[in-house]
Image (cartoon, helix red, strand yellow):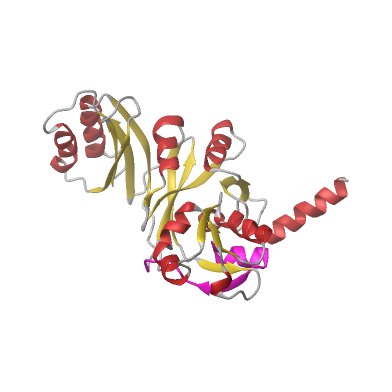
Amino acid sequence: MNAMRGSARKLAEAVWGVGRGRAKVGYLGPPGTFSQQAALTYDPMARHVPFGDIASVVRAAEVGDIDEAIVPLENSTEGPVTLTTDLLVHHTDLRIRREVVLPIHHCLLTEGDVDFHQVRVVYSHPQALAQCREYLARRLPRAEAIASLSTVRAVQDMQIHGRGAAAISSMRAAEVLRAFVREGHIEDIPGNRTRFVVLAPEDHEPTGRDKTSICFDFEADGPGTLYLSLGELAERRINMLKIESRPARSSLGRYIFLIDFEGHRTDRFVAQALDRIRERASSFKILGSYPKARTPKA
C-alpha cells in the first residue's frame, strides 16, 4: 500500500508540477485551474497544494498547514471576487504578501467534436461564465449555463453529463482531462486578466516599488467623511490606485471602504497618512504592503 501511495505521489508531482521546494503554496483546485497557474507563476519551485474552496486555502495558511495561500481577488472584466474580499476584511489576519496578475484565456471544451446545435448545457465557474456571457449568447443561445465549483470541476461535470454538454475552462485543463477544445480565446474582452494575491502571516518588506491595501469604515456618516480621509493621501502626494466598497454587515447603508495606493506602510508619508485615516475611522485594517506586480501581456 505504501509503495502504491509513493507511486501515486510521484505521478502527481510529474503531472501537476508538485515539487519539493522550500515553501508550500495552497491554491484553489483541483489541479489545472487558473489558480494553479498563478501559483506556478508565483513560485514554480514550491510544493503546490490544491484545496476545494477559497476559504479552505485561507484557513490552511492560518493554521500553518501551508506557508502561503494564493487566491483570486479581482478580474478586469467582472470586478472583485467578493468571497476573497470578505475573507480579508472580516475573517482573517493574514496579510497580502505578493500579487500576481495573470492573463485569462477561456476555451469551450466538449466531449469529442460535438456540433454547437447539440450543446444543451455549459458548465463553468460563475466568474468564467460571466466573462464569456456575450460569447454564449451569440454562439450557444439555447444552452443553459450551470455553475461549477471551479473551471476544472466544470470539465469533470461535463464529462459526467456526457454528449450535449460543454465546459468553459483553460487549455491546461483540457490537456490534463483530455477534453476536446472546440474553440479558444472565447472571453468577451481582449486583455482579460485576474489579479491574485498571496496571503501569509506577514506582508513583504519594502522594495521601493510597493503598494499598500487597507480597509476602514465610519460609525457616523456625514458630508465629506470619506473625502477628508482620502485627502490624507492627496496631501502627501500618495497616488491612490483603487477604491471599492463592501457592506459592513452591521446595518443597512453602512459600508467598508477598501483602497489600494502606492507606497509601503513603513514609508514616512504613508505611515503618517495611515495614522490620520485610522484616527478618523471607526474600524481600520491594513491588509498588507507588497511589491506591485508587473502587468503581463495578454
State left or right for residue 287 relative to residue 221.
right
Q: Residue 2: percent from the left, percent from the top?
A: 86, 45
- Give the answer, above or below, for where 136 lies relative to 195: below
Residue farthest left in this picture: 223
Q: Residue 177: percent from the left, percent from the top?
A: 67, 63
Would residue 194 be counted in the magenta stretch?
A: no
**Residue at left 55%, top 56%?**
151
Q: Within the image, what quadrant is residue 51 found in?
A: top right
Q: Residue 25: percent from the left, percent from the top?
A: 57, 46
Q: Residue 183: percent from the left, percent from the top?
A: 52, 74
State left or right for residue 62 relative to residue 12.
left
- The reply to whether residue 239 is in sight is yes
Q: Within the image, what quadrant is residue 17 found in?
A: bottom right
- The reply to whether residue 204 is in sight is no
**Residue at left 54%, top 33%?**
62
Quadrant (top left/top right/bottom left/bottom right) for the C terminus: bottom left
Between 82 and 51, which is closer to the camera in this rendering? 82
Q: Which residues are magenta?
A: 168-190
State left or right for residue 225 relative to residue 40.
left
Would residue 189 be counted in the magenta stretch?
A: yes
